Amino acid sequence: MDTAQKEYYLREQIKAIQKELGDTDSQENDALRERIEASDMPAEVKEKAKKEFARMTRMAPGMPEISLVRNYLDWLLELPWTKTTTDSIDIDQARAILDRDHYGMDKVKNRILEYLAVRKRTDNAEGTILCLVGPPGVGKTSIAISLAEAMGRKYVRMSLGGVRDEAEIRGHRRTYVGAIPGRIIHTMKQAGVVNPLFLLDEIDKMSSDFKGDPASAMLEVLDKEQNNTFRDHYIEVPYDLSHVMFVTTANTLDTIPQPLKDRMEIIELSGYTDVEKLQIAKRHLLPKQFAKHGMKDGELRISDEVLMEIIDDYTREAGVRNLERRIADLCRYCICRAKGGESVRITSRMLPRILQGHHYIRSEATLENKIGVATGLAWTAVGGETLSIETAVMSGSGELVLTGSLGDVMKESATAALSIIRAHAQKFGISDEFYKTKDIHVHVPEGATPKDGPSAGVSILSSMVSALSNTEVRGDTAMTGEITLSGQVLPIGGLKEKSLAAYRAGVKRVIIPEGNRDDVREIPKEVAGKLEFIPVKNVGQLLSNSLAGDMCRGN
């Protein structure tokens, strides 16, 4: 007790001397000590803060490490440890917010409403991590914003595009010069509460190098069994992320590591139909651009037919970003030419002049029966497209030539198709010796555009059989599917986007694998009602429906 009293007496004397000399460091230390005592940090964290503070006060004045320790204590004090916002979940209100901000997307909206309904009843859906996957411009980020508004939560966003350093996620150790916390802790400080809606944008764009693998560091962040004790290298104490609602976005699942993918529930957002784009333009894009350009209602008049022409001929995308840019072009044109608040009416004849340089020529189906020409369907990141597969047969020594910037998978599909034809030549009405006397050239136009994927197998086979048997391919038919050497037609993905491409190309029939029969229900009614879907199991059924002749009936 004598020793403690003596230390207390000496410290009080030091304080009095510092106060007499006008030393502000002592006053700042007292204020910092009071902040630590009054903070809501967990006991373990508060004990760590007190130790660091005691170590700082024992350092000689002017030491560089004092500022490092003070910065560390500021981080501990400014992080939210217990402060929360109260969820205000009203299913009807949430539905209204989603319908207000987004047109269509019924499947995605229903899944989000189911999530909110479960959370409202049990208050125990913290571990569910939603991953919104879809092409650019379909509204993934805006859905997360609407969800935060519907729940009454604070919204914070962190972009993972191009992140290749593990320290971006977990921070740097304090022994390094210039060490700072990782972006997870930094964003939580920005949120100010322990339960924000945290959007991890572009999670498929992370990469890795010699500095570590950030995708592996994200495993701890997104695992409900681990993230309640997330440890940042800079903070050095466990931080509870279990109350955070994580939502991630991606354009594709191919580049996301499987362990990380397993921690998320995938919700796919496909591209919009032309009818949906028209409604989005009228309800959202036009009012938004009017406000952005300071225009009033009525200054720009545009009919639904002209908007649909812009959608069909001046945009090539699954989302609506380019459509918004084209509408912005119209607004600028109107502002430059409107006099005295007069209204400007946009007609079809004016579009080439206003939107010059943005016109797209789509790959249209021939719609005529031709020998050796089949219409395939392909999925791209900007929606579905039609592909014209052409085959020419010439005298030669059995060489197979493939052109059109085909990838390895499409080349393998062509090789498999040739093997199937050789194995069943008589059945297809083709000479058994064709591979000795004929050269086959398969070409996919637009050679400057790389093409790959397994779903072109059925169209390549139909084109080759047509050319070798001198039988026409039906021009009103498009097809998609993968083939095997045993003659089976395997299921494919992206049927909705491919069906939209077939609809735009004007075809009437679409041949699909039998395994995709149930996927037809996902196609919008306005598209499915105009197309006849023909499921096939094997190449016999395929050729009997794709070729104009009566050959190859049955299996």
Image (cartoon, grey):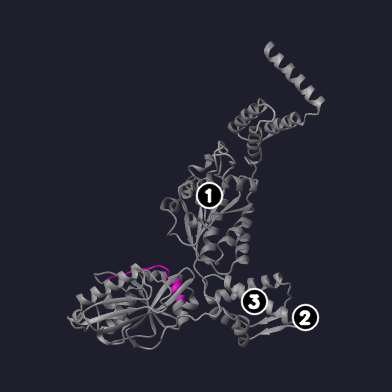
Residue topped by disc 2:
341
Secondary structure beneath label 2: loop
Q: Seen in the image, is 375 located left or right of residue 7?
A: left
**Which residue lies at the image location 56% right of the left edge and 38% below the top edge?**
176
Please tell me which of labels 1 and 2 falls first in the chain: 1
Q: Quadrant of residue 463?
A: bottom left
Residue 29 picture location, percent across and down: 72, 30
Q: Quadrant of residue 469?
A: bottom left
520 versus 53 height, above or below: below
Foreground of the two, 301 or 531: 301
- Depth-wise, is mark 3 or mark 2 nearer the camera? 3
Q: Amino acid at mark 2?
A: Gly
Foreground of the two, 392 or 113: 392
Residue topped by disc 1:
125
Numbered range of the magenta stretch: 488-500
Rounded to the nearest angstrom, the CA distance separating label 1 from label 3 is: 45 Å
Secondary structure beneath label 3: helix
Quadrant location of the N terminus? top right
Rounded to the nearest angstrom, the CA distance separating label 1 from label 2 is: 54 Å
Q: Amino acid at mark 1?
A: Ala
Residue 300 picture location, percent across and down: 69, 80
Rounded to the nearest angstrom, the CA distance separating label 3 from label 2 is: 18 Å
Q: Seen in the image, is 84 located left or right of residue 497?
A: right
Q: Seen in the image, is 166 located left or right of residue 39?
A: left
Residue 498 seen in the figure: yes
Residue topped by disc 3:
329
